[in-house]
Image (cartoon, rainbow, N blue to C red):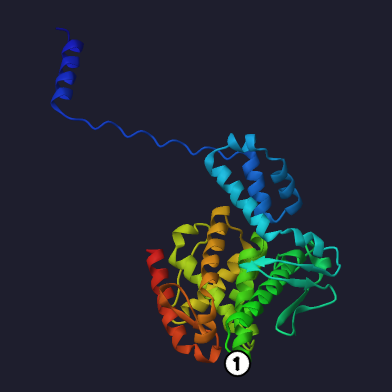
Amino acid sequence: MSYIARAFATVLASASAATFAAPAPAPAPAAPESETHQRIVDEYLTGKVPELEAELNILTPKQLEAMPAHERADFGYIRQSMAECRPAWWAQCKLGKKIAFQPTVWRPINATYDPAAKGVGVNFNGTAMLLTLGWDYKNMDDAGEGEHGFTKGELNQREVWMDVGSAEAWMAIAMFLPANPPKTMISHYVELRGDLTTVYYSLPRARRWSLWLYCAAHTDHFAKMQDVNSRKAVAGYLVAEVVGHHEKYPSIALPPTLEATGAEAAMALYLKDWLEKNSWTLAEDKSIRDAFRTFASSVDKNVMQAGKVTLPGGMAVALDADKDAANVVKRDAWVKAAYDKAKH
């Protein structure tokens, strides 16, 4: 037998005497996103409403059928979000005329849009509540420079949804509150419901603006604001969501360190700066939006009666800032522990 033959026989004998694990197949590369998908997601995240609406209108069922399931799911979500965030009355109000309309935030409400009014007007005709809303229609969708990198239109989005959300809160107050509740508690509740409405119903960039503003409640500028803790409750929920479920938000790098004392405020201010300078993915934006819908569903008459809201982990935020000191200590401890876990 030749040397080569003997060597080959030796290899075969060795192979038969030993068990070799078959090499694991290489993971299949992720399918590239289609240009249409990339473009539509970008238009949604950056607030290019006319282009986005045009794209969505020309997509045919046959085209959607041919797309991967995850792309179809994204388009379905964006369509649903646009239907909620850009309802038919939006274009009507942009005309600057007084109209009766029925916006839906959490539930339908009957109201009047009056461009000459400012904010929310609440009046009664017997037992019927009359709600009048007013904001600057000229700034709706204005692409001009606003504040902190956001446009005038994005700032205006918050005003619109704040008014509509506050109107819904007033309707809820008339339905379930006892007679003559404290005026300060009414103010806290209306602010909170309005703030939550802006986070859920705004488009992504305007959503970031609202969250920026609520995280800024931890700055000295807002220290004497009557309803500051309503905003801090929203910021606290954002902090708890991002730190407690950080795996869902890979775009948001956590700060390198976080002191135990003042952990919640420090994290809120860190997120404020991040929101001003960065964007997030469609999945992250959807996750934030879904989380705040869950939070909003918990803000009901019990919040008004208890004077506080509950955050993840059983933490609480007293809507009266003077009664929140003990809660702050507990929230700081929870945030610090969640941060340490996420970092390690």
Q: Which of 343 and 67 is in front in this view?
A: 67
Q: How crowded is mark 1: few (under 14 residues within 10 Å), some or many (20 or more)?
A: few
Outermost front residue: 126
Q: Residue at x 44, y 72 (%)?
A: 312
Q: Which residue is drawn at 60% across and 69% down?
A: 273
Which of 111 and 197 lies nearest the eye of the viewer? 111
Image-based side of 154 in relation to 276, left or right: right
* Residue 125, quarter of picture: bottom right
The image shows residue 68, relative to residue 88, as above or below, that is above
Q: Where does label 1 land, which residue?
A: 182
Outermost residue toward the top in this view: 1
Q: How many labels does the image show?
A: 1
Q: Which quarter of the rendered picture does the C terminus lie within?
A: bottom left
Point out residue 146 in the picture as x, y percentages from the top left corner.
76, 68
Report the quarter where the N terminus lies: top left
Q: Please name the residue shown 86% across and 67% down the image.
A: 96
**Mark 1: secondary structure:** loop
User: What percent of the width, then of the height, locates residue 322?
Assistant: 53, 92
Q: Is there any visible trace of residue 291 in the rendered image?
A: yes
Q: Which residue is drawn at 67% across and 65% down?
A: 104
Residue type marked 1: Pro
- From this view, report whether residue 59 is shown above or below residue 106: above
Residue 85 is situated, as x and y percent measured from the top left of the image, at 68, 60
Q: Is residue 279 above or below residue 4?
A: below
Residue 260 in view of the camera: no
Left-right relation of 138 to 240? right
The quarter of the picture where residue 214 lies is bottom right
Left or right: where does residue 253 sit relative to residue 123?
Answer: left
Residue 210 percent location from the top left of the image: 64, 70
